[in-house]
């Protein structure tokens, strides 16, 4: 998900709740940079769309 934290938009992993290191002034900038930062949006049947950080993606591959 994308949340506003301390005045800037940050990516928040829907699996581990980790915040991205990068913050953005505009919501759309967070959306646009999600892919280049290694984050993925994954559709889960039970929970809907989830934003997943690179670390949790690696964990899921094991």
Image: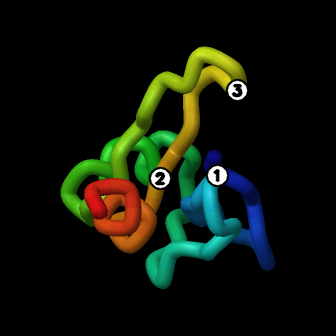
Mark 3, residues whose alpha carbon is within 10 Å: few (<14), some, or many (≥20)?
Answer: few
Q: Position of residue 1 (x, y in %)?
A: 63, 46
Q: Is residue 59 left or right of residue 10?
A: left
Q: Which residue is mark 2?
A: 52
Mark 3 or mark 2: which comes first in sequence? 3
The residue sitting at the front extreme is: 62
Q: CA distance from mark 3 to mark 2?
A: 13 Å
User: In the drawing, what numbered circle is on residue 14?
Assistant: 1
Mark 3 or mark 1: which comes first in sequence? 1
Q: Quadrant of residue 54?
A: bottom left
Q: Are marks 2 and 1 in contact (CB under 8 Å)?
A: yes
The residue shown at (60%, 65%) is 10
Q: CA distance from mark 2 to mark 1?
A: 6 Å
Label 1 element class:
loop
Q: Position of residue 60 (x, y in %)?
A: 38, 56
- Vertical comparison of 50 with 34: above or below: above
The residue shown at (79%, 78%) is 6
Q: Which residue is mark 3?
A: 47
């Amino acid at each position: 998900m994308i949340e506003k934290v301390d005045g800037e938009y940050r990516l928040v992993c829907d699996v581990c709740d980790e915040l991205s290191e990068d913050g953005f002034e505009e919501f759309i900038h967070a959306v646009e940079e999600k892919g280049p930062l290694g984050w993925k949006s994954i559709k889960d049947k039970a929970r809907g769309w989830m934003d997943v950080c690179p670390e949790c993606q690696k964990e899921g591959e094991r």
